[in-house]
Image: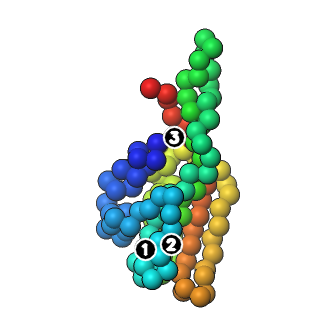
């Protein structure tokens, strides 16, 4: 599922133009690298079996935190909103939790939102 999310972000024209290839998962960018906008995809839990029929599970439940780091608050907000639409198209809903903060040491804005969704088991 991580690859599906990554590919959906890369395919989006707004994200591609504002972020380019600065989409990370499992790791955060170096502080020196924070001059440009970044997206961090962080799996918060392992996939869980869900939606059972005939003693088999049909779907897996996922939870991700997706963060946008940017020096520009307007860009951060635009990208975070676009991510929310993309995640909705991938059957992930925003679970209502997250962080909206400004790091004065780095002069950078951060938006972190959590998404939960399901995917059919193949």
Decide: few, some or many residues near mark 1? Use Cα within 10 Å; few <14, some 14-19, many ≥20.
many
Q: Is residue 19 above or below residue 107?
A: above
Closer to the camera in the image, 34 or 8: 34
Nearer-the-camera pick, 78 or 62: 62
* 59 versus 117 height, above or below: above
> Label 2, label 3: how many angstroms apart (C-alpha)?
24 Å
Q: In this view, does 86 lie to the left or right of 47?
A: left
Q: Is residue 50 left or right of residue 68?
A: right
Task: List the residue tagged with mark 3.
Answer: 91
Q: Can residue 72 be seen in this view?
A: no
Q: Can residue 45 be seen from the camera position used here?
A: yes
Q: Earlier in the sequence, mark 3 or mark 1?
A: 1
* Disc 2 crowd, CA 10 A, few/some/many (<14, 14-19, 20+): many
Could you say where residue 97 lies in the image, as x and y percent from the top left? Answer: 68, 57
Q: SS class of the residue under badge 3? A: loop
**Decide: marks 2, 3 in contact (CB < 8 A)?**
no
Q: Which of marks 1 and 2 is nearer the N terminus?
A: 1
Q: Which residue is the extreme one toward the right?
A: 97
Label 2 near label 1: C-beta < 8 Å? Answer: yes
**Is residue 119 positioned above or below 42 on the image?**
above
Q: Say the numbered circle drawn on residue 37.
A: 1
- Mark 3 Cα shell of 10 Å, populated few (<14), some (14-19), many (≥20): few
> Is 26 drawn above or below residue 29 in the view shown?
above
Taking the spot 33% from the left edge, 66% from the top edge, the residue there is 20
Q: Distance between the residues labelled 1 and 2?
A: 6 Å
The residue positioned 54% from the left and 44% from the top of the image is 92
* Front residue of this view, candidates 74 and 46: 46
Place of residue 70 in the rendered image (x, y in percent of width and height, measured from the top left):
48, 76
Q: Nearer the viewer, mark 2 or mark 3?
A: 2
Q: Quadrant of residue 57?
A: top right
Residue at disc 2, secondary structure: strand
Q: Name the residue under label 2.
A: 69
């Amino acid at each position: 599922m991580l690859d599906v999310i990554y590919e959906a972000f890369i395919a989006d024209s707004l994200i591609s133009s504002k972020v380019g290839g600065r989409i990370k998962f499992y790791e955060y960018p170096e502080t020196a690298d924070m001059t440009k906008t970044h997206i961090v995809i962080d799996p918060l839990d392992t996939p869980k079996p869900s939606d059972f029929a005939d003693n088999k599970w049909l779907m897996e439940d996922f939870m991700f935190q997706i963060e946008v780091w940017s020096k520009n608050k307007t860009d951060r907000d635009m990208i975070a909103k676009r991510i929310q639409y993309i995640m909705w198209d991938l059957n992930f809903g925003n679970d209502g939790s997250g962080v909206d903060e400004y790091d004065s040491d780095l002069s950078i804005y951060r938006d972190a939102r959590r998404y939960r969704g399901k995917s059919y088991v193949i």
